[in-house]
Image (cartoon, coloured by chain):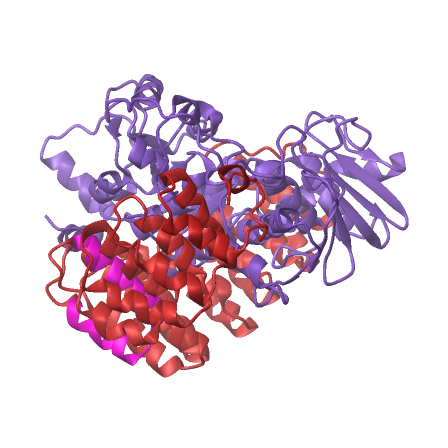
Chain colours: A purple, B red
Amino acid sequence: MSSSCKDQEHNNWSKFSRRKFLKTTAKAGLVLAAPTIIPGSALGLNGSVPPSERIILGGIGIGPRGTYDLERLLESKDVQFVAICDVKKVKREAVKEKVDKHHGNSDCKMYIDMREFLAERTDIDAVLIATGDRWHAMASINAMRAGKDVYSEKPSAMTIAEGQAVVETARRFGRVYQTGTQRLSEANFAFADELVRLGRLGKVHTVRAHIAPWDSGIMNHEWLPEEPLPAPDEVNWDLWLGPCPWRPYNKKYVDGGWRGHHDFHTSCIGEWGAHTFASCQRAIGALDTSPIKYHYVNNSTGDTMETVFANGIKMVLHRDEDKKLWRGSCGVRYEGDEGWVAMADGYEKPDVSDPALLADFDKIVSEYIARTQHPMNHWRDFLRCVKSRRQTVANPEVMHRSMSTVHAANACVWLARDMEYDPVKEEFVNDDEANRLRSRAQREPWTA
Amino acid sequence: MSVTQLKSNLIAAAESESDLLAVLKSDAGLYEKTEACRKLAVVGGKSAVEPLIALLGDEKLSHMARYGLETNPDSSVDKSLVEALGALKGKQLMGVIASLGVRRDANAVEALAGFLKDADSEIVQTAARSLGRIGGLAAIEALKGALEGSTGASRIAICEGLLRCAERAAAKGDNRTAKGVYDSLREVEAPHQVRAGALLGAIHSRKKNGMKVLLEALHGDDFAMAAAAARAAQELQGEDVSKALAEELPKLSADKQVLVAQTLGDRGDKAGLGGLLALARSGDRSARLAAIRAIPQLGDPAAVDALKELTKDSDGVISRSAQRSINALTGVADEDSSDTGSEG
């Protein structure tokens, strides 16, 4: 049956009310096994999940980080995970085992090729994508084309062009998308951002963003030595590479050693900048733009690079290896003419210039939640938005603009010169070489 | 140029174009030629076109040749890519079709249209999306012609091509063309995501007159379209939109009431308050909760008295939610902000 025919069938189903469905099945003597919540797809409603229905979830490329995401998503009672697609057998089987145990059945189906997975599973409403960075955007685009909503791990785009394509695809098909910058849904970070928005720090002039202190900004272009290809069922190397340039197989890549390689990674800047730039940009109301200036610093990491937004606020990048600014990972610090706040992972409460700033912590977080209706749970925010069709807290535009900052900062390091960027035209000013770094030809058949 | 130089980590224009071209023409290995193509993507000009075009049929280097060509600003790239189409097949052909789309070469429309009936579905899909990137009336006609009889993934891609054409037209201020494409897609048999996209476009391309289409979808039998209408309503400007949505609330099913209540909250203007308060007082529990939660988003203290009445509701979840909304409106901290459970 063609997908269009299937959809026509679903159209007919959607005219068949839920009550009528229940009545008919009861008359026929069918027993509706638990759970009693009927999945939206069973009612022909896929493409949108009514608030009273269950969300049917699938996954693409779920390793350690994806497993953490999956566990958070499965905490919600209205989620059922039904299929995993992964080019690595060991990961496919691990996810199936985990999910089957959780649901108490053996229903989780396994796929290797996302084309087959997406075409076949018209019952799936939303997809968790937690591949390596190289696949995040292309897998998201393919899933949204297939009518799925998407939760994608970060960094969610390898280039500015990929980010644009994610934004356009989500808008084109009316899809819900959340990037995995979960600190946007954590109380301490929300509080710090709100302090700025509410003017409690006076006029903010500088924000500081943590970048990963272990990786380099300069990417590796070398190939690891060729090793014999594993059986395609064990690791499908061609699918693992996806839209990236071909190179010979080496086990280290697929075991996590892809980081640091130009084709697969967005550098130390993207590794944590995906989180911290989004936080900084939310705090200063710059989620629909990017800095206009990037000042080159003569190092290979981008450490202390100063960027400037159109409103004059500076955002400075810090590795902070000696932990002077923060006591944890993914720190941010906002400095105004009346005070400052600093925040990182593991803090009980943010550091502040004056303890009085913390007096309204609970009130400020409560007001933020009430005002935005974004809960302090990133995964729940996504699931809520799947049902309500609202924009998530880390929606495509938020992802694209913060990742554009990452890409521009990377270009500044790679070309070793100051840059100016026009966030309206989304192009570098008078710099042809930098503009040619905004996109990369994707390897067929994986073209956006 | 030495291999050591080519392995330099910097992408910067450290090597000259002529050095890189010499690598391509030499008997250097696959790695060296791959890296030369990568660097030509940044520094290559007119003289790089012919050597890179010559690699398009090379199974191992075709992609990297496109990598070097796609960003090359020289106008001869487009003509050369179109000319190369006839000599290629399979993945290499697919790649060139994609690159012509990325470069938005309007002169390639006729050639690309010829692939819309190809036996290889992936070729059809790539051609359809490329035509959509290029846009224009000729691309629209070609895609419409290919839609009839298409199935499966090819059909979705052809629809995507048309949606892209409509976006291009709207971006250029040609709302009439955009509206025509969106309306035509609403009439065809297509998957939910295409119907949702077409509906969103049909509403937005009508500007102020889009509300009629939005309300029709909201009241229709297809929940996916009602949900898409709610998404569109979040993006439309003006208090009259909120007022119209609030007036529809009593006429909708509970699931749709939840959607519209959340939408009114996101819109945040006071025109939605009366409808939300009425819904909060009676009806389906989930819909009442959605209304109660949406009310603080409007930031209107006038809602506090009505919410106080709801704190006396016999349903504990309703009364607690009402208290939370009062807290949000009056600046009182809430005890629990984690919200990890299911709704309602």
Q: Is residue A309 left or right of residue B39?
A: right
Residue A199 in the image: above or below residue B35: below
Q: For the magenta stretch, what is the residue range?
A: B121-146
- What residue is drawn where x is 31% and y is 31%? A237
Residue A352 seen in render: yes
The stretch drawn in magenta includes residue B286: no
Task: State the image coordinates of residue A202 (x, y, percent, origin top left).
Answer: 86, 52
Residue A371 in the image: above or below residue A30: below
Residue B220 seen in render: no
Nearer to the camera, A60 or A406: A406
Q: Is residue A446 left or right of residue A409?
A: left
- What residue is drawn where x is 59% and y is 42%? A274
User: Residue B148 appears in which quarter of the rendering?
Assistant: bottom left
Task: State the image coordinates of residue B163 (x, y, percent, origin top left).
Answer: 32, 67
Residue A85 in the image: above or below residue B100: above
Nearer to the camera, A2 or A446: A446
Q: Is residue A105 left or right of residue B114?
A: right
